[in-house]
Image: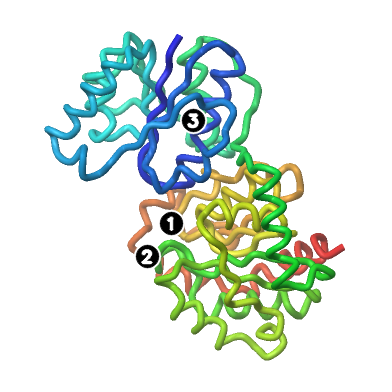
Amino acid sequence: MKVLVIQIKMIGDVLASTVICEAIKKQHPNCEVHYLIQKNTFPVVENNPFIDKVLFFEEDKYKGLSGLFRLGTELKLEKYDTVIDVYGKFQSLIPTYLSGAKKRIGTYKWYSKLFLTETVIPDTECNGTANAFRILLAKTAIKKDIPQIFPKIHLTPSEIENAKNQIASQLDVSKKIVMISVLGSGKNKSLPNAYMAEVLNKIASTADVQLVFNYMPNQQEEAKAIFNLCDANAQSKIVFDFYVKGLRGFLAVLSQCDALVGNEGGATNMSKALNIPTFTIYAPWINRTSWNIFEETGLHEIVHLSDYFPDLYKNKHPKNFKEKALEWYDKLNPELFADKLQQFVKKISQ
């Protein structure tokens, strides 16, 4: 059996969908599993033992309808028995259909049956809906029950050793290290600067830890603005210029941290895949149950506006309020979750 899993775009989604590859490979060890992703997301699947081959979706090469037909033709040459389209948009549906696979599986939409042989409807009410949806796709593909599986990142011993050496050369290894997701991918996924500074002040006043800022190069100015808003005690504990080479280097360093605190995003998912405790502040318009895996372990905590102002949502999905993100973020004052944050910091500081 030969299976292709398609997950284009976001790095957190690419990491999440590796559970499909793992589920299939564990049930059918001789199955050949391929994974179609974008090249910039490759570091989170590198060395994954449940993926036999990684294919790259190149934006320029597969641009437009003609490009998607070209991709479909290339996939057809692979002679897949099953294609699982996790992405579920025309960029993936068209190549999935053109692959000629006998089984083509994906999400139910009014138009998806034109391209797929089987569709599934995600359970939007359960915890960890993103993970449950992917397990459901795998079950549909192999027609077997699958035990609970969660995403994992597979680092090499040399990567971990290099990370330890870098940490030893730039940080105080006698102190706990907390990675800070100081900014989200955009303003509508980032706690306001003044509030993030309050969060950092609270952490610094709770325990003698090192706070390593994690941000994209184009976010440096805003990250510095948050640093400037922090009190002197927090500033003395912040490591602002801890640079690593590439995403694999970041993952290796993250694997040696004691926790991650900050805005929800790819770094949170990576931390969980590395079994690193997280304290995650969700954007008001993001569904808190989508990615909240492992909460029952006690390792991870989530903060969401709906925890404190449930009536705002009127029983509607948070995505309906995306345009209110900046306005509603102002309601998420860190004082609301100060006790919860302090308890988390004390726990990881022991």
Residue 289 pos. (x, y %): 55, 44
Depth check, front residue: 56 or 327: 56
Q: Could you say which disc has been placed on residue 285 in the image?
A: 1
Question: In the rendered structure, which amino acid carries the disc numbered 3?
Answer: Phe
Residue at 64% across, 47% down: 272
Q: In the displayed structure, would residue 323 be above or below residue 272?
A: below
Say which of marks 2 and 3 sits in front.
Answer: 3
Residue 142 pos. (x, y %): 50, 12
Residue 52 pos. (x, y %): 50, 24
Residue pushed farthest right? 350
Quarter of the image holding residue 103? top left
The reply to whether callout 2 and callout 1 are in contact (CB within 8 Å) is yes
Q: Quadrant of the C terminus?
A: bottom right
Residue 43 pos. (x, y %): 50, 45
* Gap between marks 2 and 3 measured at Cα: 27 Å
Q: In the displayed structure, would residue 81 be above or below residue 106?
A: above
Q: Could you say which disc has been placed on residue 133 in the image?
A: 3
**Residue 103 in the figure: left or right of residue 303:** left
Q: In the displayed structure, would residue 177 be above or below residue 111?
A: below
| Marks 2 and 3, the one that precedes in the sequence | 3
Depth check, front residue: 126 or 220: 220
| Marks 2 and 1, the one that precedes in the sequence | 1
| Element class at badge 1 | loop
**Residue 138 in the figure: left or right of residue 27:** left
Assess disc 2: are there few (<14), some (14-19) or many (≥20) residues with their C-alpha within 10 Å of its C-alpha: few
**Residue 242 in the figure: left or right of residue 204:** left
Residue at 74% across, 50% down: 299
